[in-house]
Image (cartoon, helix red, strand yellow):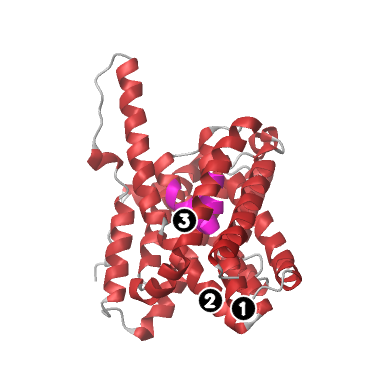
């Protein structure tokens, strides 16, 4: 009897296999660690372990195609998958209530990132990453804009690490300050939801204050996260205009194409969210989709860690950390001031 031959793996898959397997193996370990220490979370463990492996063991060139695929394509797939877990109608009411504070804090974050970044001489792409991460939703926002502005991997890793540092500070500090300022449950929830970056940190700080504060902070944070969509579209247009100007100054024909620069994964994110909102995603499988999206983010950020050059990160010095501190402080204070003015404290 002739042996049954299995179809050979595609050349692209064979080329990417070693890097993908390495990223997946580390991501599994990071996912488990994140479950044990939820305050840090799987994505942060993934990027930290990835950086350690990259700089201690230096995987060879054969790993690069798979690592690059994970850090780009899988990253975009993870953002799309998140859309299936976000119902737009679910957060609409709270979104309208918190919109004034959210818009002010976002504006303050971007203005502070630009001004303070110039003073500290932090380059543009790192300023954008830290500004977006602080203004919107931490590592998820950084992950969403990365395919658009195409920063170096060590810049992405540095930005996520900086945002993570202030997430930890916020979880410990915000409840103490909230009680000292005698904030109401809704007032604290609105403050935490608009001024703390990562969703897990918002949840941790909110529920340590009260259950009501935790519920409100979580919904405010989800609403805030949807604003990454217009931000990505604006960034895509800005990047396209810069490319067109650069080509013109160089005296070469511009290859500007809206189709090429448009962040299609954001459009598919909207489609996924619309499908979820319309009720076409069975409730029973929603936790599995969320788990898959969470794991893909860990894989992607692990790959970014595996691409990060620790020496280049170290050469950047303390300036990005000072930038992150300044932006975070400005957002925290502006959120409280707006609440004081509109009487929502």
Question: Which x, y percent locates residue 29?
Answer: 61, 65
Residue on which the image places disc 1: 185
Q: Which of 318 and 265 is in front in this view?
A: 318
Q: What stretch is highlighted in magenta?
A: 129-145
Question: Which x, y percent locates residue 121?
Answer: 62, 29
User: Which residue does the image show at 33% across and 55% down from the upper left?
Assistant: 266
Residue 103 disc label: 3
User: Which residue does the image show at 24% across and 35% down from the upper left?
Assistant: 257
Sequence-first tag of 3 and 1:
3
Magenta stretch prevailing secondary structure: helix
Label 1 secondary element: helix
**CA distance for labels 3 and 1:** 21 Å
User: Which residue does the image show at 55% across and 67% down from the upper left?
Assistant: 193
Name of the residue lying farthest toward the bottom? 284
Q: Which of 172 and 41 is in front in this view?
A: 172
Q: State which mark lies toward you, 2 or 1.
A: 1
User: Which residue does the image show at 46% across and 62% down from the upper left?
Assistant: 224
């Amino acid at each position: 009897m002739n042996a049954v031959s299995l179809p050979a793996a595609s050349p692209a898959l064979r080329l990417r296999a070693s890097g993908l397997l390495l990223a997946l193996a580390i991501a599994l370990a990071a996912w488990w660690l994140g479950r044990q220490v939820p305050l840090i979370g799987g994505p942060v463990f993934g990027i930290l372990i990835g950086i350690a492996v990259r700089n201690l063991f230096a995987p060879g060139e054969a790993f690069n195609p798979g690592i690059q695929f994970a850090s780009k394509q899988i990253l975009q797939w993870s953002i799309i998958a998140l859309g299936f877990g976000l119902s737009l109608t679910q957060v609409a009411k709270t979104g309208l209530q918190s919109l004034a504070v959210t818009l002010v804090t976002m504006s303050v974050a971007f203005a502070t990132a630009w001004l303070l970044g110039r003073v500290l001489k932090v380059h543009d792409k790192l300023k954008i990453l830290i500004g977006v991460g602080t203004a919107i939703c931490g590592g998820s926002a950084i992950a969403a804009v990365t395919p658009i502005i195409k920063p170096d991997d060590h810049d992405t890793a540095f930005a996520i690490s900086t945002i993570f540092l202030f997430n930890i500070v916020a979880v410990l500090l915000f409840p103490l300050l909230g009680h000292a300022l005698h904030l109401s449950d809704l007032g604290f929830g609105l403050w935490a939801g608009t001024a703390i970056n990562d969703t897990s940190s918002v949840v941790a700080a909110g529920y340590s204050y009260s259950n009501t504060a935790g519920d409100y902070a979580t919904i405010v944070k989800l609403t805030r996260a949807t604003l990454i969509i217009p931000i990505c579209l604006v960034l895509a247009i800005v990047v396209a205009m810069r490319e067109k100007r650069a080509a013109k100054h160089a005296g070469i024909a511009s290859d500007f194409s809206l189709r090429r620069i448009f962040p299609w994964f954001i459009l598919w994110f909207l489609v996924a969210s619309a499908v979820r909102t319309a009720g076409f995603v069975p409730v029973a499988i929603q936790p599995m989709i969320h788990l898959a999206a969470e794991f893909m983010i860990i894989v992607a950020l692990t790959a970014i860690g595996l691409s990060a050059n620790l020496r280049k990160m170290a050469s950047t010095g303390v300036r990005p950390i000072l930038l992150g501190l300044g932006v975070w402080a400005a957002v925290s204070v502006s959120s409280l001031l707006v609440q004081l003015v509109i009487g929502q404290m």
